[in-house]
Image (cartoon, helix red, strand yellow):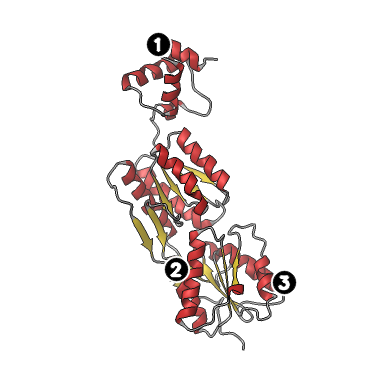
Amino acid sequence: MATMADVARRAGVSVMTVSRIISGNGAVKESTRKKVLRAMEEVNYVPKGYTKQVIQHEISTLVLIIPDITNPFFTFIARGMEDVAKKQGYRVFLANTDENLNKEQQYIQMCIEFHADGVLIAPVGDESRANLALLDKEGIPYVLIDREVEGVQVDVVKSDIVGTSKALVEHLIELGHRRIGVVTGAPNNRTSRERVEGYFQALAAHGVARSDELVKYSVMTRDIEPTFIDELLQLAEPPTALFVANMFQYAHSINRLKEFGLCVPDDMSIVGFGNSDYLAAIDSSFTSAIQPTYSFGSLGTQMLLERIEGLREMPRRIVLEGDIVIRRSTAPPRN
């Protein structure tokens, strides 16, 4: 099998030069690059993990990095991205981090090694700053979707989480609820904190006493261990309503409440964020905020392509409005 040294001898350059051309790191004359690529072809050398098209930059690639591939919320984002990217001749590769910073770093490193043209990413949390800095260092454009990261000033597409959360909780308050539990994601996630901020704003606007014991942080995936329901129901004064972050938390809440002999909405009203198409298949009663997830993907990709083409310099922040749909999961409290 041919080696990098074989390529270097054939092209009349150093092994280091061949390495720089393959990795894309360091300045190399175009004439030298072509000579090395021709030598690679002649000795039939393709480094492990690379295709000939990637090395020669014949394939334009974008990467979508998301925290949970099983969540339909991100499925719609992927569809929006692919529709725009395909029209512009880009291939889209999908990476799933499982809300894990190490996996996120590995995928970002992969983007660098395979010379991705750009990245659309829903970061794990504030600690993602170090991972995103790797993209900055390599000059790979990226756009944040759904989640912002403290201290990172780049393009972002998201929804008005604070305003929508406030509106959902106000719906419960208007029905007469005063003890409202909130279940959100990890506190290191800015979107999770924004849900809580909207919740507290709604309480303050209506003169409802704030109780931090009603705020629970939980994972956001399908594999939730719904201990938050147990903790809330075991309070001296349990809530009469819940505000949950996503459809997985809603589904787990429903199931756990049934185990306690409670039903929705007679014993517990529930509101939250959810995707209507997915909910229609499992439960069409969820009073929820519907976010324009397809637009997250399509607009985010358009912004990313503008970055790749050098059409803009200043970061752009797009905040989209969500729609609240009132269904059968909410009702006035019994007492």
Residue named by callout 2:
162
Identify the element where label 3 is drawn.
Answer: helix
Q: What element carries label 2?
A: helix
Q: Find out whether the residues at labels 3 and 2 contact each other: C-beta distance under 8 Å.
A: no
Q: Distance between the residues labelled 2 and 1?
A: 61 Å
Please tell me which of labels 3 and 1 falls first in the chain. Answer: 1
* Distance of label 3 from label 1 (alpha carbons): 74 Å
Q: Mark 1 highlights which residue? A: 12
Q: In this view, does 332 lie to the left or right of 319?
A: right
Circle nearer the N terminus (2, 1): 1
Quadrant where the image shows the C terminus: bottom right
Rounded to the nearest angstrom, the CA distance separating label 3 from label 2 is 32 Å
The numbered disc on residue 259 is: 3
Q: Which residue lies furthest to the front in this view?
A: 151
Which one is in front, 25 or 31?
Answer: 25
| Numbered circle sitting on residue 237 | none
